[in-house]
Image: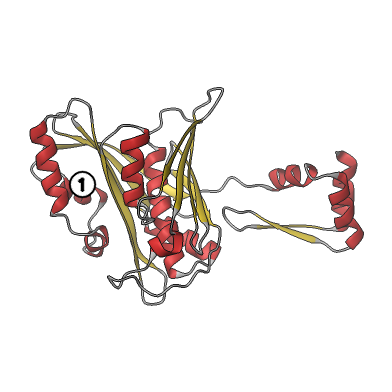
């Protein structure tokens, strides 16, 4: 679990016609990079997804609500899965963590190339009989543009999403963060036009992060000329809820033949959590005892 130095700001502007979220996520993205030993391009992609997932998580109302943000792509990274709750907790992993690619035509990390064509899926489990699932085709694979498209088509909410991860020369995370701006149905044409002009002239998120802008300052830049009210600041962190009990349950759910095969090999096994890479080790005797308890 990463320390709570990261946080999300929730704000409104233009008499509540605009709602806005921004995050600083350097520590949680660095924690993910370290846990999964990700390459720079995967760190950038996973970092953008974690930042977006954390902000989307706090949009949910219930304490037990869960959001899953997934990308499946035809590129070498294959996909990314992130889950978040309404309390600023987020976790995630990339299917292939060590992808190496040359920079894109702008000299930047080629996140779009690592993901390529595919789909983005948002699953919201809000305690109802069936979870909400929204699926859209990827537009660029750069994640922010894909989320902008998702909000417009699946949730019918005009939005602007900006995400960035800035790397140090030693491939650790220098800065990470982003914003989500959404227009409410009551928004006038005048406000929309003014906001569009702001976004058109906006520096990149990585440029603003390099200037060490706080989440509130990110939003002030995007919402320049609007009166903004900050309503809430929520601590954010990479938090995984894996445990020995959960791993044991998943081992118990294997078929008897599979467990028998593992025991027959006579070697201890190691099971790693997909989300945080924590290792759980079991001896043959523990596996035998586990099988008896089934």
Horizontal side of 32 relative to 286 (left or right) equals: left
Judged from this view, the residue extending furthest toward the top is 129
Q: Is residue 33 above or below residue 145?
A: below
Residue 253 visible, this angle: yes
Give 269 or 198, whichever is nearer the viewer: 198
Give 289 or 114, whichever is nearer the viewer: 114
Horizontal side of 73 relative to 247 (left or right) equals: left
Q: Residue 240 appears at what percent x and percent y?
A: 55, 48
Q: Quadrant of residue 19?
A: top left
* Residue hosting label 1: 219
Q: Residue 94 appears at what percent x and percent y?
A: 52, 58
Determine the residue positioned at 32% across, 43% down.
149
Determine the residue positioned at 43% across, 59% down.
116
The quadrant of the image that shows the C terminus is: top right
Determine the residue positioned at 77% across, 47% down.
251
Give 212 or 77, whichever is nearer the viewer: 77
Q: Residue 255 appears at what percent x and percent y?
A: 83, 44
Q: Residue 14 appears at what percent x and percent y?
A: 13, 33
Horizontal side of 277 relative to 288 (left or right) equals: left
């Amino acid at each position: 679990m990463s320390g709570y130095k990261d946080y999300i700001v929730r704000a409104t502007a233009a008499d509540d016609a605009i709602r806005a979220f921004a995050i600083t996520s350097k520590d949680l993205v660095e924690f993910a990079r370290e846990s999964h030993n990700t390459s720079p391009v995967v760190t950038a992609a996973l970092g953008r997804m974690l930042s977006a997932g954390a902000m989307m998580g706090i949009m949910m109302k219930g304490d037990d609500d869960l959001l899953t943000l997934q990308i499946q792509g035809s590129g070498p990274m294959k996909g990314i899965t992130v889950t978040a709750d309404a309390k600023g907790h987020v976790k995630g992993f990339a299917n292939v963590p060590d992808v190496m690619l040359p920079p894109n035509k702008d000299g930047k990390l080629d996140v779009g190339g690592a993901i390529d064509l595919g789909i983005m899926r948002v699953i919201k489990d809000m305690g109802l009989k069936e979870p909400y699932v929204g699926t859209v085709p990827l537009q660029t694979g750069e994640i922010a543009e894909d989320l902008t498209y998702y909000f417009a088509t699946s949730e019918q909410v005009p939005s602007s999403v900006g995400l960035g991860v800035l790397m140090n020369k030693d491939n650790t995370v220098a800065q990470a963060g982003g914003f989500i701006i959404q227009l409410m149905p009551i928004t006038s044409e005048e406000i929309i036009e003014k906001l569009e002009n702001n976004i058109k002239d906006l520096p990149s998120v990585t440029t603003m992060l390099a200037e060490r802008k706080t989440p509130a300052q990110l939003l002030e830049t995007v919402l320049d000329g609007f009166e903004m009210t900050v309503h809430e600041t929520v601590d954010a962190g990479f938090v995984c809820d894996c445990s020995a009990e959960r791993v044991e349950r998943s081992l118990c759910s294997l078929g008897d033949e599979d467990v028998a095969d593992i025991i027959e090999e006579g070697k201890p096994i190691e099971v790693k959590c997909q989300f945080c890479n924590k290792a759980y080790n079991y001896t043959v005797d523990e596996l035998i005892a586990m099988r008896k308890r089934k």
